[in-house]
């Protein structure tokens, strides 16, 4: 199976690159970025877990944190499919820009079914990130 890539738009965030990186590295903050279908969100250290209502439960762990540039999350334990969720951060004067990507190993049938929900997920996440008061 090949990887199917989903990318959000680049979103301007009214905070500097370091502040955005620190905000995203604290997985407790990811709860603020999740759509309403996500329930039972818990986070500590470099791990988080949650349930997608009517679908599945997931546990994620930070696989890579490249200072001020990127945070990569991967499933921990059992997941319906292999994937990685990556926040890309770049400087834009005193602000920053963030793009969220999700690369998933999906068979063609699953890719067709999951395309809209996964694309919506990353767009919601990046939009909600732009609404946060990041110090």
Image: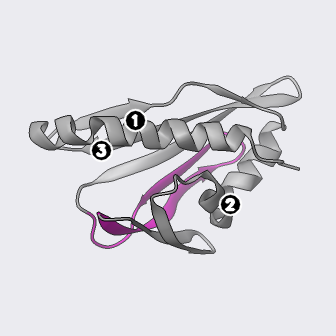
Looking at the image, residue 23 sits to the left or right of residue 134; the answer is left
Q: Is residue 46 above or below residue 10?
A: below
Of badges 1 and 3, nearer the viewer stands 1
User: Would residue 66 be found to the left or right of residue 20 on screen?
Assistant: left
Nearest to N terminus: mark 1 or mark 3: 3
Residue 119's label in the rendered image is: 1
Along the line of sight, the residue nearer the viewer: 112 or 25: 112
Magenta-drawn stretch contains 56:
yes
Q: Main secondary structure of the magenta part?
A: strand
**Disc 2 and disc 3: Cα gap in Å?**
23 Å
Percent position (x, y) of residue 83? Answer: 33, 50
* Residue 23 circle label: none
Where does the magenta region start and end? Answer: 55-79
| Residue picked out by circle 2 | 29
Residue at coordinates 45% horizontally, 65% vertically from top-left? 60
Residue at disc 2, secondary structure: helix
Q: Where does residue 80 sit, x and y in percent of width and height?
A: 23, 61
Residue corresponding to mark 3: 104
Tag 1, which secondary structure? Answer: helix
Circle 1 residues within 10 Å: few <14, some 14–19, many ≥20: some
Question: Image quadrant of residue 114?
Answer: top left
Q: Quadrant of residue 130?
A: top right
In the rendered structure, which disc, 1 or 2, sits on the residue that comes first in sequence?
Answer: 2
131 versus 99 height, above or below: below
């Amino acid at each position: 199976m090949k990887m199917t890539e989903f990318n959000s738009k680049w979103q301007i965030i009214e905070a500097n690159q370091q502040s955005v990186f620190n905000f995203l590295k604290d997985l407790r903050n990811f709860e603020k970025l999740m759509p309403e279908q996500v329930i039972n969100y818990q986070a500590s250290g470099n791990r988080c877990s949650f349930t997608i209502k009517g679908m599945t439960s997931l546990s994620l762990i930070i696989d890579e944190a490249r200072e001020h540039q990127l945070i990569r999350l991967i499933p921990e334990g059992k997941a319906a499919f292999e994937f990685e969720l990556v926040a890309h951060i770049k400087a834009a004067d005193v602000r920053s820009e963030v793009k969220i990507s999700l690369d998933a190993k999906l068979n063609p049938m699953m890719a067709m079914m999951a395309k809209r929900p996964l694309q919506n997920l990353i767009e919601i996440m990046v939009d909600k990130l732009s609404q946060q008061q990041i110090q």
